[in-house]
Image (spheres, rainbow, N blue to C red):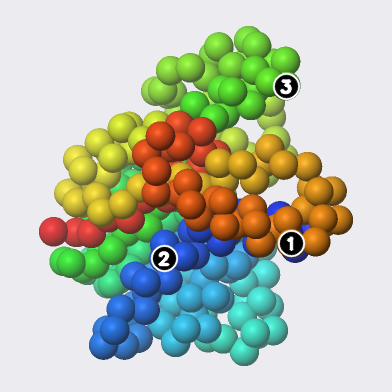
Amino acid sequence: MANEPAGRGSTRTAVVWSGLEPVLDREGSGARDVLDIGGGTGGLAVRVGALGHRVTVVDPSPDALAALDRRAGEHDVAVTGRQGDLSTLLDVVGPDSADVVLCHGVLEVVDDPAAALATLAHVVRAGGVLSLLVAQRHAAVVARAMAGHFQQALAMLDPQTGSGPHPADPPTPTGRSGRRYSHDELTSLVGDAGFAVDTVHAIRVFTDLVPGSLLDLEPGASAALVELEQAVATRPEYLPLATQLHLLAHRA
Ligand SMILES: C[S@@+](CC[C@H](N)C(=O)[O-])C[C@H]1O[C@@H](n2cnc3c(N)ncnc32)[C@H](O)[C@@H]1O
């Protein structure tokens, strides 16, 4: 993400942030305890910390945590980094320890998503909020087919049941490819873990289809694209076209 042009980077994150900001900024709620599980190098965590919240990033990667420290220092924001993963999370941060849990880009790579969500339900305080960002499957099928990878598209049609990366994915150095979810699969998993779903937004409906050069060269194109993405994010008919789903839920 660091090498992306500013235009595309901002269009990728704008809708998620505008969904999250009101949750973090509830009037009278003051500083909250925010856990960013799999927070990586802290792009989101530092932004949340800059609002005055107490942010802890738990991530298995020591390199990511070192980059998080550097990023937090550069922005003069206090963020705590702890090494761990979803399977050890309760030992690292303890139960009922967070008002808000961010779990972005992680549910794709865990071995057992249901167990991961059950763990998060123990970490979030009653009434607290879960923010999940996951890859959406139907858009990925279309993208593979449009690129001429018809066998891969075919293999991705149904939910993946095994662990690890999807068999249709080419190996990637970062291992980022993994499970993808439909709206119904995601809301059902989250509900089964004891959360009440508040919203599901469509993220990156158009952004990944637009040539980067257009965003770089056309004055005002990035802002117009963000406006369009914001406009379709809450329309259910665009959910199957979205690269990602952003779900907000609370623990009853
Ligand atoms: C795709 S990155 C997402 C980083 C960040 N949350 C974001 O949205 O930009 C996935 C992150 O999950 C971490 N991760 C991988 N397996 C994990 C696990 N089992 N539990 C928690 N984090 C994990 C990786 O180290 C990596 O930092």
Amino acid at circle 1: Gly
For label 1, the SS is: loop
Image mark for residue 220 = 1
Pointer 2 and pointer 1: residues touching (CB < 8 Å)?
no
Q: Residues under labels 2 and 3: Cα distance?
A: 33 Å
Q: Quadrant of residue 166?
A: top right
Q: Residue at x 40, y 34 (%)?
A: 237
127 lies left or right of 45: left
Q: Quick check: 111 above or below 38?
A: above
The spot of residue 52 in percent (x, y) is 44, 87
The spot of residue 59 in percent (x, y) is 51, 60
* Quarter of the figure that contains the C terminus: bottom left
Mark nearer the viewer, 2 or 1: 1
Residue behind mark 3: 147
N-term-proximal mark, 2 vs 3: 2
Camera-side residue: 161 or 238? 238
The spot of residue 229 in percent (x, y) is 55, 51
